[in-house]
Amino acid sequence: MRPHQSGRYNPRTQHAAKGVWNKFFRESHMPFANPLRKTLLATLLFAVWAGAAWAGPKQSQSKVLRMGINPWGTEKEMRDMFRPLLDYLGEHLGVTVQMVVPTTYDELLDRVSAGELDIVAFNSVTYLRSRRMGLPMRYIATMDNIFDGESTSRSYYTGYIFVRKDSPYRSLDDLKGKTFAFVDPSSASGFKMPAAMIGLRKGATPEKYFSKFFFVGDHSEVASAVYYGCVDAGATWDNSYNMNTQPQRFGAAFRIIERTPPIPNDAWAVGPRVDSTLAAKLKRVLLLIDRTTKTRDGRTVLNPALGFPGSGWSERSPQFYENAADLLLYAQN
């Protein structure tokens, strides 16, 4: 129930006031004969009327937008890296942006289908799936990245198949009959692209190519599984690989043996609760953000030290994603 706002007439409490007044009048045989009674009556009436008509200070009605993010890292990692950005968007849109981190990629689509999310950062696969499901999400922008050793941003990334540095395996050919860690059935670099490579190059499915394989949930878990020898190899994307080879993580423990074709970066889209004016404002704000942008309290909005992969946004189109659909949806369930 929405809280009663200052200055608004409340018929329920006004009706109660009228009842108190009538009761007092009935029980007072000559209400105006006694000046003291008259004063008490007037005071009571004013107090009850004031309580009915002015039910407290006005409550803030700031609009809340719920934003869903693909769970390619742990929930803590995702919340830490996205918090400055969501606060910045709230500052410039005049809204509160709440972050939702689903446990799986399919849960993200389920929440979109249920109308629970207003802004979504889809990966390329979930975006393509949302279009085929007919979900009412409107594309607004594509995240750009600047990767280590590069000076210009780009709107795509690369998937890796990797092993421990001391592993004897050197190529995809060597992994036949071995164990493997994928991320999630809807992860582009963490399943779709590697499965397409196996299908197109080896004429096999993961079920037939590997002795066992696992969906471990996020990219950091893939790195852990490979590092600790739970599997022989795993699939991830370049940004997560860079994060997990930092000295404070696993260091120089891995070796890349295969790279995927380019995969479009995350598509940002809005749902039906975001009107065209707010959607256009969100797009303008995103397109002006870069690595130097800061929140009002001085935090870096896109902070690579927190693992945030983006360097800004550019305007592409849904067709940018459709161009890669044959490979990305090759292993569609």
Image (tube, rainbow, N blue to C red):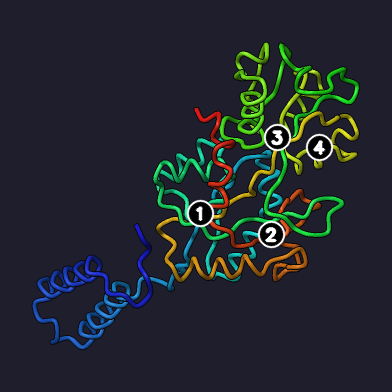
Q: How many marks?
A: 4
Res. 200 mark: none
Res 230 visible:
no
Local SS, label 3: helix
Name the residue nearer the viewer: 76 or 92. 92
Res. 84 mark: 2
Look at 66% across and 20% down and name the residue there.
202
On the image, the x and y values in percent for residue 231 come to: 75, 18
Q: Which residue is mark 3?
A: 219
Give the amino acid at mark 1.
Arg
On the image, the x and y values in percent for residue 126 come to: 53, 41
What is the quadrant of residue 221 in the picture?
A: top right
Look at 67% across and 15% down and name the residue there.
210
Q: Disc 4 vs disc 3: Cβ atoms closer than 8 Å?
A: yes
Q: Disc 4 vs disc 2: Cβ atoms closer than 8 Å?
A: no
Q: Which residue is mark 1?
A: 66
Res. 244 mark: 4
Crowdedness of circle 1 by 10 Å Cα count: few (<14), some, many (20+)?
Answer: some
What is the quadrant of residue 98 in the picture?
A: bottom right
Q: Disc 4 vs disc 1: Cβ atoms closer than 8 Å?
A: no
Q: Which of the two discs, 3 and 1, labels the residue nearer the N terminus?
A: 1
Local SS, label 4: helix
- The residues tagged by marks 3 and 2 sit, at their Cα atoms, a distance apart of 22 Å
